[in-house]
Image: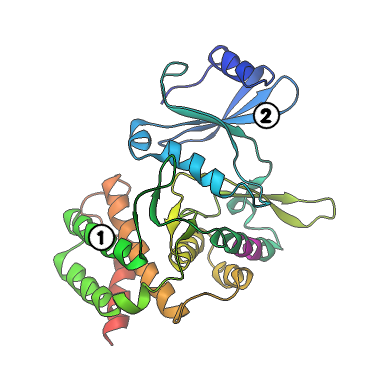
Amino acid sequence: MHQPTLSALHPILTDLGLAAPIVITDIKDGTNRVFRIDLADGTGVVLKQYDEHYKHHYVVAGETYAERLLAKLDLPITRYLLQDESLTRLPYPFAITNYLPGATVKSLRDEPDIADLYRQMGALLRKLHAVPAPAYGQFGPDGVIDGKQTNAELMRSGFAYHFAQFRNFGGGEALAARLEAIVADRFDAMTWSRGPVFAHDDLNPNNVLAQRDASGRLLLTGLIDFGNARAGDAVSDLAKNLFNTEHELPGSSPFILEGYGPIDHPDPEGALWFYTLHHRLVMWWWLRHVGIIPDGEHHDLIDALTQMADEAEV
Protein backbone atom coordinates (compact mmCIF):
# COMPACT_ATOMS: atom_id res chain seq x y z
CA MET A 1 0.00 0.00 0.00
CA HIS A 2 1.03 3.63 -0.53
CA GLN A 3 2.44 5.95 2.11
CA PRO A 4 0.21 9.06 2.25
CA THR A 5 1.78 12.50 1.99
CA LEU A 6 0.86 15.80 3.60
CA SER A 7 0.56 17.50 0.21
CA ALA A 8 -1.94 14.90 -1.08
CA LEU A 9 -4.04 15.05 2.09
CA HIS A 10 -4.13 18.85 2.38
CA PRO A 11 -6.82 19.54 -0.28
CA ILE A 12 -8.94 16.60 0.91
CA LEU A 13 -8.99 17.87 4.48
CA THR A 14 -9.54 21.45 3.35
CA ASP A 15 -12.67 20.34 1.46
CA LEU A 16 -13.91 18.82 4.72
CA GLY A 17 -13.39 22.14 6.51
CA LEU A 18 -10.51 20.75 8.58
CA ALA A 19 -7.15 22.27 9.48
CA ALA A 20 -3.99 21.46 7.57
CA PRO A 21 -2.27 18.12 8.25
CA ILE A 22 1.11 18.41 9.96
CA VAL A 23 2.07 14.87 11.05
CA ILE A 24 1.24 11.41 9.70
CA THR A 25 1.66 8.44 12.03
CA ASP A 26 1.24 4.81 10.97
CA ILE A 27 -0.94 3.20 13.66
CA LYS A 28 -1.94 -0.08 12.03
CA ASP A 29 -0.10 -2.17 9.50
CA GLY A 30 -1.63 -4.92 7.43
CA THR A 31 -3.83 -5.30 4.36
CA ASN A 32 -5.69 -2.08 5.08
CA ARG A 33 -3.29 0.35 6.72
CA VAL A 34 -4.46 3.01 9.16
CA PHE A 35 -2.81 6.39 9.87
CA ARG A 36 -3.42 9.09 12.47
CA ILE A 37 -3.30 12.55 10.92
CA ASP A 38 -2.45 15.35 13.37
CA LEU A 39 -3.87 18.71 12.29
CA ALA A 40 -2.57 22.23 12.74
CA ASP A 41 -5.34 23.18 15.18
CA GLY A 42 -4.43 20.41 17.62
CA THR A 43 -7.15 17.99 16.53
CA GLY A 44 -6.73 14.80 14.58
CA VAL A 45 -8.41 12.42 12.16
CA VAL A 46 -7.74 8.93 10.86
CA LEU A 47 -6.99 7.83 7.30
CA LYS A 48 -7.93 4.25 6.41
CA GLN A 49 -6.61 2.66 3.23
CA TYR A 50 -8.40 -0.20 1.46
CA ASP A 51 -6.98 -2.57 -1.11
CA GLU A 52 -8.95 -3.98 -4.05
CA HIS A 53 -10.05 -7.05 -2.06
CA TYR A 54 -11.84 -4.81 0.42
CA LYS A 55 -13.40 -2.73 -2.31
CA HIS A 56 -14.63 -5.81 -4.15
CA HIS A 57 -16.27 -7.17 -1.01
CA TYR A 58 -18.21 -3.96 -0.26
CA VAL A 59 -16.26 -3.28 2.93
CA VAL A 60 -15.94 0.46 2.32
CA ALA A 61 -19.65 0.98 1.65
CA GLY A 62 -20.62 -1.57 4.29
CA GLU A 63 -18.81 0.36 7.00
CA THR A 64 -20.89 3.44 6.16
CA TYR A 65 -24.12 1.47 6.51
CA ALA A 66 -22.87 0.01 9.80
CA GLU A 67 -22.30 3.50 11.15
CA ARG A 68 -25.77 4.58 10.08
CA LEU A 69 -27.33 1.68 12.00
CA LEU A 70 -25.52 2.81 15.14
CA ALA A 71 -26.15 6.53 14.67
CA LYS A 72 -28.70 6.78 17.49
CA LEU A 73 -26.63 4.89 20.04
CA ASP A 74 -24.58 6.84 22.54
CA LEU A 75 -21.38 4.94 21.81
CA PRO A 76 -17.83 6.15 21.10
CA ILE A 77 -17.43 4.62 17.64
CA THR A 78 -15.71 5.39 14.37
CA ARG A 79 -17.60 8.10 12.46
CA TYR A 80 -16.93 8.51 8.76
CA LEU A 81 -16.26 12.02 7.51
CA LEU A 82 -15.49 10.89 3.96
CA GLN A 83 -15.26 7.70 1.93
CA ASP A 84 -13.81 7.78 -1.55
CA GLU A 85 -13.44 4.81 -3.92
CA SER A 86 -12.92 6.91 -7.07
CA LEU A 87 -9.06 6.72 -7.08
CA THR A 88 -9.03 10.32 -8.30
CA ARG A 89 -7.69 12.00 -5.15
CA LEU A 90 -5.59 9.14 -3.79
CA PRO A 91 -4.44 6.04 -5.70
CA TYR A 92 -6.51 3.70 -3.48
CA PRO A 93 -9.95 3.59 -1.87
CA PHE A 94 -9.86 5.41 1.46
CA ALA A 95 -11.85 6.82 4.33
CA ILE A 96 -11.33 9.77 6.67
CA THR A 97 -12.78 9.20 10.13
CA ASN A 98 -12.81 10.81 13.54
CA TYR A 99 -9.94 10.04 15.91
CA LEU A 100 -10.82 8.19 19.10
CA PRO A 101 -8.50 8.49 22.11
CA GLY A 102 -7.16 5.67 24.21
CA ALA A 103 -5.05 2.56 24.02
CA THR A 104 -6.19 -0.88 22.91
CA VAL A 105 -7.61 -3.15 25.59
CA LYS A 106 -4.94 -5.69 24.68
CA SER A 107 -2.18 -3.21 25.53
CA LEU A 108 -3.77 -2.72 28.98
CA ARG A 109 -3.86 -6.44 29.80
CA ASP A 110 -1.53 -6.11 32.80
CA GLU A 111 -3.57 -3.40 34.54
CA PRO A 112 -4.87 -4.65 37.93
CA ASP A 113 -8.47 -3.67 37.12
CA ILE A 114 -8.52 -5.07 33.57
CA ALA A 115 -11.49 -7.31 34.45
CA ASP A 116 -13.64 -4.18 34.64
CA LEU A 117 -12.82 -3.46 30.99
CA TYR A 118 -13.80 -6.98 30.02
CA ARG A 119 -17.20 -6.44 31.66
CA GLN A 120 -17.55 -3.19 29.72
CA MET A 121 -16.74 -5.05 26.49
CA GLY A 122 -19.58 -7.46 27.24
CA ALA A 123 -21.97 -4.60 27.97
CA LEU A 124 -20.90 -2.86 24.74
CA LEU A 125 -21.60 -5.99 22.72
CA ARG A 126 -25.01 -6.23 24.35
CA LYS A 127 -25.83 -2.68 23.19
CA LEU A 128 -24.81 -3.53 19.63
CA HIS A 129 -27.02 -6.61 19.66
CA ALA A 130 -30.00 -4.46 20.63
CA VAL A 131 -29.85 -2.85 17.17
CA PRO A 132 -32.09 -4.79 14.74
CA ALA A 133 -31.14 -5.43 11.12
CA PRO A 134 -33.45 -6.07 8.14
CA ALA A 135 -32.08 -9.53 7.25
CA TYR A 136 -29.09 -11.81 7.82
CA GLY A 137 -26.03 -11.14 5.68
CA GLN A 138 -23.28 -8.78 4.64
CA PHE A 139 -23.72 -5.02 4.77
CA GLY A 140 -23.68 -3.07 1.53
CA PRO A 141 -24.12 0.64 0.81
CA ASP A 142 -27.87 0.67 1.45
CA GLY A 143 -28.64 -2.43 3.47
CA VAL A 144 -27.96 -6.15 3.55
CA ILE A 145 -26.68 -7.72 0.33
CA ASP A 146 -28.55 -10.86 -0.72
CA GLY A 147 -30.13 -11.00 2.73
CA LYS A 148 -31.31 -14.28 4.24
CA GLN A 149 -34.57 -14.36 6.20
CA THR A 150 -33.43 -16.95 8.72
CA ASN A 151 -30.20 -17.63 10.56
CA ALA A 152 -30.47 -21.30 9.57
CA GLU A 153 -30.42 -20.37 5.89
CA LEU A 154 -27.35 -18.19 6.40
CA MET A 155 -25.51 -20.80 8.47
CA ARG A 156 -26.35 -23.66 6.11
CA SER A 157 -24.71 -21.92 3.16
CA GLY A 158 -21.88 -20.72 5.39
CA PHE A 159 -21.02 -24.16 6.72
CA ALA A 160 -21.10 -25.64 3.21
CA TYR A 161 -18.61 -23.04 2.00
CA HIS A 162 -16.32 -23.24 5.02
CA PHE A 163 -16.16 -27.04 5.07
CA ALA A 164 -15.23 -26.93 1.38
CA GLN A 165 -12.45 -24.45 2.18
CA PHE A 166 -11.33 -26.53 5.16
CA ARG A 167 -10.89 -29.55 2.89
CA ASN A 168 -9.33 -27.48 0.12
CA PHE A 169 -6.60 -26.15 2.41
CA GLY A 170 -5.76 -29.57 3.86
CA GLY A 171 -7.82 -29.78 7.04
CA GLY A 172 -8.31 -33.49 6.44
CA GLU A 173 -11.28 -35.47 5.20
CA ALA A 174 -11.66 -37.55 8.36
CA LEU A 175 -11.90 -34.56 10.70
CA ALA A 176 -14.11 -32.63 8.25
CA ALA A 177 -16.55 -35.55 8.07
CA ARG A 178 -16.70 -35.88 11.86
CA LEU A 179 -17.36 -32.18 12.31
CA GLU A 180 -19.99 -32.12 9.54
CA ALA A 181 -21.89 -34.93 11.27
CA ILE A 182 -21.83 -33.02 14.56
CA VAL A 183 -23.06 -29.84 12.90
CA ALA A 184 -25.86 -31.69 11.11
CA ASP A 185 -26.99 -33.36 14.33
CA ARG A 186 -27.23 -30.06 16.23
CA PHE A 187 -28.01 -27.67 13.40
CA ASP A 188 -31.75 -27.07 13.81
CA ALA A 189 -31.60 -26.51 17.57
CA MET A 190 -28.44 -24.44 17.63
CA THR A 191 -29.29 -22.06 14.76
CA TRP A 192 -32.43 -20.86 16.54
CA SER A 193 -32.24 -17.07 16.56
CA ARG A 194 -34.33 -14.21 17.90
CA GLY A 195 -33.66 -12.26 14.71
CA PRO A 196 -30.92 -10.44 12.78
CA VAL A 197 -29.01 -7.80 14.72
CA PHE A 198 -25.94 -5.63 14.30
CA ALA A 199 -22.92 -7.95 14.58
CA HIS A 200 -19.49 -6.34 14.75
CA ASP A 201 -17.91 -9.73 13.94
CA ASP A 202 -14.47 -8.55 15.06
CA LEU A 203 -14.97 -7.07 18.52
CA ASN A 204 -11.60 -8.11 19.89
CA PRO A 205 -9.17 -6.39 22.29
CA ASN A 206 -7.34 -4.75 19.38
CA ASN A 207 -10.49 -2.97 18.19
CA VAL A 208 -11.64 -1.60 21.54
CA LEU A 209 -9.93 1.44 23.07
CA ALA A 210 -9.82 2.57 26.70
CA GLN A 211 -8.18 5.05 29.05
CA ARG A 212 -8.50 6.17 32.66
CA ASP A 213 -10.97 8.90 33.50
CA ALA A 214 -10.44 11.72 36.00
CA SER A 215 -11.22 9.38 38.90
CA GLY A 216 -8.70 6.82 37.69
CA ARG A 217 -11.19 4.23 36.44
CA LEU A 218 -10.50 2.44 33.17
CA LEU A 219 -13.29 3.26 30.71
CA LEU A 220 -13.89 2.24 27.12
CA THR A 221 -13.30 5.20 24.81
CA GLY A 222 -13.80 3.76 21.38
CA LEU A 223 -14.95 0.91 19.15
CA ILE A 224 -13.18 0.84 15.80
CA ASP A 225 -12.94 -1.16 12.57
CA PHE A 226 -16.33 -2.06 11.11
CA GLY A 227 -14.80 -3.89 8.15
CA ASN A 228 -16.35 -7.21 9.22
CA ALA A 229 -19.65 -5.81 10.51
CA ARG A 230 -22.77 -7.52 9.24
CA ALA A 231 -26.30 -8.50 10.15
CA GLY A 232 -26.14 -11.72 12.09
CA ASP A 233 -27.15 -13.78 15.07
CA ALA A 234 -26.27 -12.30 18.46
CA VAL A 235 -25.02 -15.56 20.00
CA SER A 236 -22.74 -16.24 17.04
CA ASP A 237 -21.24 -12.76 17.38
CA LEU A 238 -20.81 -13.21 21.13
CA ALA A 239 -19.10 -16.56 20.56
CA LYS A 240 -16.65 -14.96 18.13
CA ASN A 241 -15.89 -12.18 20.60
CA LEU A 242 -15.16 -14.75 23.31
CA PHE A 243 -13.09 -16.87 20.92
CA ASN A 244 -10.96 -13.94 19.75
CA THR A 245 -10.56 -12.26 23.13
CA GLU A 246 -9.79 -15.43 25.05
CA HIS A 247 -7.05 -16.18 22.52
CA GLU A 248 -5.49 -12.76 23.07
CA LEU A 249 -6.34 -12.39 26.78
CA PRO A 250 -6.81 -15.74 28.54
CA GLY A 251 -9.27 -15.59 31.43
CA SER A 252 -11.35 -12.75 29.97
CA SER A 253 -14.43 -14.80 29.02
CA PRO A 254 -16.20 -15.00 32.43
CA PHE A 255 -16.03 -11.22 32.83
CA ILE A 256 -17.25 -10.55 29.28
CA LEU A 257 -20.18 -12.90 29.88
CA GLU A 258 -20.91 -11.15 33.17
CA GLY A 259 -21.04 -7.79 31.42
CA TYR A 260 -23.12 -9.18 28.55
CA GLY A 261 -25.83 -10.64 30.75
CA PRO A 262 -28.46 -13.29 29.87
CA ILE A 263 -27.99 -15.01 26.49
CA ASP A 264 -31.17 -15.14 24.42
CA HIS A 265 -31.15 -18.77 23.30
CA PRO A 266 -32.93 -21.93 24.56
CA ASP A 267 -29.50 -23.58 25.07
CA PRO A 268 -26.94 -20.79 25.65
CA GLU A 269 -23.97 -23.03 26.43
CA GLY A 270 -24.73 -25.37 23.55
CA ALA A 271 -25.06 -22.45 21.13
CA LEU A 272 -21.77 -20.90 22.23
CA TRP A 273 -20.09 -24.30 21.75
CA PHE A 274 -21.67 -24.72 18.30
CA TYR A 275 -20.64 -21.28 17.07
CA THR A 276 -17.14 -21.65 18.53
CA LEU A 277 -16.73 -24.73 16.34
CA HIS A 278 -17.79 -22.64 13.37
CA HIS A 279 -15.37 -19.81 14.18
CA ARG A 280 -12.45 -22.20 14.72
CA LEU A 281 -13.19 -23.89 11.41
CA VAL A 282 -13.24 -20.55 9.58
CA MET A 283 -10.18 -19.22 11.37
CA TRP A 284 -8.06 -22.27 10.50
CA TRP A 285 -8.68 -22.21 6.75
CA TRP A 286 -8.38 -18.42 6.61
CA LEU A 287 -4.97 -18.50 8.32
CA ARG A 288 -3.93 -21.19 5.85
CA HIS A 289 -5.27 -19.10 2.97
CA VAL A 290 -3.25 -16.02 3.95
CA GLY A 291 -0.12 -18.04 4.73
CA ILE A 292 0.04 -17.49 8.48
CA ILE A 293 -0.22 -21.27 8.87
CA PRO A 294 2.20 -22.70 6.28
CA ASP A 295 1.18 -25.66 4.17
CA GLY A 296 1.72 -28.87 6.12
CA GLU A 297 2.31 -27.18 9.49
CA HIS A 298 0.25 -28.48 12.39
CA HIS A 299 -1.70 -25.87 14.37
CA ASP A 300 -3.45 -25.70 17.73
CA LEU A 301 -6.76 -24.94 16.00
CA ILE A 302 -6.77 -28.46 14.54
CA ASP A 303 -6.19 -29.85 18.03
CA ALA A 304 -9.07 -27.74 19.35
CA LEU A 305 -11.43 -28.93 16.58
CA THR A 306 -10.38 -32.53 17.17
CA GLN A 307 -11.08 -32.13 20.88
CA MET A 308 -14.53 -30.72 20.10
CA ALA A 309 -15.26 -33.71 17.89
CA ASP A 310 -14.15 -36.06 20.66
CA GLU A 311 -16.34 -34.28 23.21
CA ALA A 312 -19.40 -34.40 20.96
CA GLU A 313 -19.00 -38.09 20.20
CA VAL A 314 -18.74 -39.26 23.81
Residue 231 among those drawn in magenta = no
Q: Position of residue 279 (x, y in %)?
A: 37, 62
Q: Position of residue 217 (x, y in %)?
A: 78, 57
- For the magenta stretch, what is the residue range? 118-123
Question: Do residues under tags 1 and 2 come within 8 Å of each other at their CB atoms?
Answer: no
Q: Is residue 249 above or below residue 185?
A: above
Q: Main secondary structure of the magenta part?
A: helix
Q: Which residue is mark 2?
A: 44
From the viewer's perspective, tell me whether residue 138 is left or right of residue 25. Answer: left
From the viewer's perspective, tell me whether residue 243 is left or right of residue 148. Answer: right
Sort mark 1 into few (<14), some (14-19) or many (20+) by Cα contacts within 10 Å.
few
* Quarter of the picture holding the N terminus: top left
Q: 149 or 170, which is in the foreground?
A: 149
Q: Is residue 242 above or below residue 102?
A: below
Q: Residue furthest right?
A: 215
> Rounded to the nearest whole Å, what is the CA distance between mark 1 and mark 2?
42 Å
Q: Which mark is residue 157?
A: 1
Q: How many marks?
A: 2
Q: Position of residue 141 (x, y in %)?
A: 43, 39
First in residue order: circle 1 vs circle 2 = 2
* Quarter of the picture holding the C terminus: bottom left
Query: What is the quadrant of residue 260 in the picture?
Result: bottom right
Q: Residue at x 38, y 68 (%)?
A: 275
Q: Residue at x 58, y 64 (%)?
A: 126
Query: What is the quadrant of residue 274 in the picture?
Result: bottom left
Question: Can you see residue 180?
Answer: yes
Q: 281 or 79, which is in the foreground?
A: 79
- The amino acid beneath tag 1 is Ser
Q: Is residue 156 above or below residue 209?
A: below
Q: 303 or 174, which is in the foreground?
A: 174
Circle 1 sits in a helix, a strand or a loop, which is it?
A: helix
Q: Residue at x 44, y 42 (%)?
A: 142
